[in-house]
Image (tube, grey):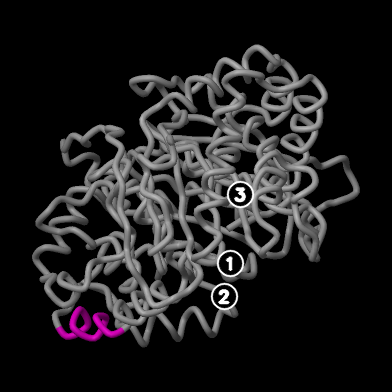
Amino acid sequence: MASRVCRSLIHPVRGRLLTSQAAAVHDVDTSSSLQPVTKVSKLGNGITVASLETYSPISHVSIVVKAGSRYESGDNLGISHLLRNMAGMGTKETTAFGLTRTVQQSGANYTCSTSREFITYQIDCLRDELDNVIGMVKNAVTMPAFKPWEIKETAASMTLDKAILKTQLPLQVFELLHYAAFRNTLGNSIYASDSMIGKFSSELLHQYVADHYTADRMAVVGIGVDHEHLQYLVGQFQCSPSSGISDAKAKYCGGEIRVEAKNDMVTAAVATEGPCINGRTKRLPSKDLLPACIMQMIMGTGPFVKYSTNNKISRLGKAAGSATSAPFGISCISSAYSDGGIFGFAATADKADIGKVLKAAFGEFASITKSGFSEEEISRAKNQLKAAVLMNAEDSNLVLKEMAEQLLIAGGLADITDILAQIDAVTISDVNTVSKKIINGKPSMAAVGNLSQTPYLDELYK
């Protein structure tokens, strides 16, 4: 379960994330020294718009709404899962067939994804087809119909999602770990429970959209688009400026969840409270995020060479490798959100070896509080972290998603060079101080598989 630096790293990169795109094939003067420029505007309808003009023949646009699973209540738990699966259904102005036909005739891709904090509707299309496609997707976001028979039909795809989830132990553990750590808010799963599938009504969906799909909770970002034209298109969105609802703050609690499964392999994760992205949690402010990212790189995020292991380089890999000669996988994990986070490790091993691996990893973290990290480890981790930042900045999908989320969390974008400078400025004292705060926090644990020989959380301290 290798955890590449994703949310925990890209979110603090509130910068000008430039992508490598081909020049436009027509109607663009590329003879001058045109450089991609990020522009941000707040429109009269209250929606924030950002663009990165790369003069590419392909436009990428995301509509991101602060309406993820963390905002669900006991009455509508799992509703964001349903919204994800209904993104291609009928609206008040067109049918599901009409939406699909427009997308296909335009040669576009249209996807919807959800996370704990956001629901993202993304369009990838030819620049000349953007007007047609975004008009249809705009209706799906701001004017959904939620026809009762379409809601009923969507239950089948939700059930399929749950069936696929049951085959992916690492993903199961990730969901359970959040539930153990936060209980509600960030603990809410991005998947609806079996008991809720088929129980959502059209009225419940319309109420959730009315509460959360408002202009102050929405951002539209584009890559390979003209900023003025994107402003014009988004200016036609019709949604309420604000619903006036207040969001519950995430609170780290800690706990343990174990799920027995007919599988001789066991996947388990242990974590404590980690830094947040914006603001301050009870114990860890957002300024601790970059030192935590450096710590994550030192502990190990999976192999960097294809088909190799991380048993000779990373701290966790070496510790687990010394405890067992059997196959295993281990990685340091970190997930940072707007007002909370978790930091720890995840491991997969045979039922007979998982206890050795977990205790070895637990002991390695404990040793850090005594000996700390060396200058050599810090220097190598900084280079790995900067490389990860710049490589992720080459992925247009990541850039698109993160630009919108940065706007909704931080309220703006900074230059990526500032982030690289901040990484260089982190000292060995910063990393050692933050590592001690994280390691000494209250732990959470989740495990799935044949747990007959998997130690309980309290047994890892012995």
140 vs 346: above or below: below
Residue identified by numbered label 1: 124
x 63%, y 58%: residue: 329
Mark 3 or 2: in front is 3
Which residue type carries mark 3?
Ser
Which residue type carries mark 1?
Asp
Question: How many marks overall?
Answer: 3
Residue identified by numbered label 3: 331
* Residue 53 on image: x %, y %: 68, 47
Chain-order first, disc 2 or disc 1: 2
Which disc, if any, is residue 108? 2
Chain-order first, disc 3 or disc 2: 2
**Alpha carbon distance from label 3 to label 1:** 33 Å
x 83%, y 52%: residue: 29
177 vs 82: above or below: above
Chain-order first, disc 3 or disc 1: 1
**Alpha carbon distance from label 2 to label 1:** 6 Å
Which residue type carries mark 2?
Ala
Q: Where are the magenta residues, as a range?
A: 149-156
* Residue 12 on image: x %, y %: 56, 32
* Residue 364 on image: x %, y %: 61, 35
Q: What element carries label 1?
A: strand
Q: Main secondary structure of the magenta part?
A: helix
Most extreme residue toward the right is 31
Q: Which sits in the foreground, 375 or 405?
A: 375
Q: Which sits in the foreground, 125 or 206?
A: 206
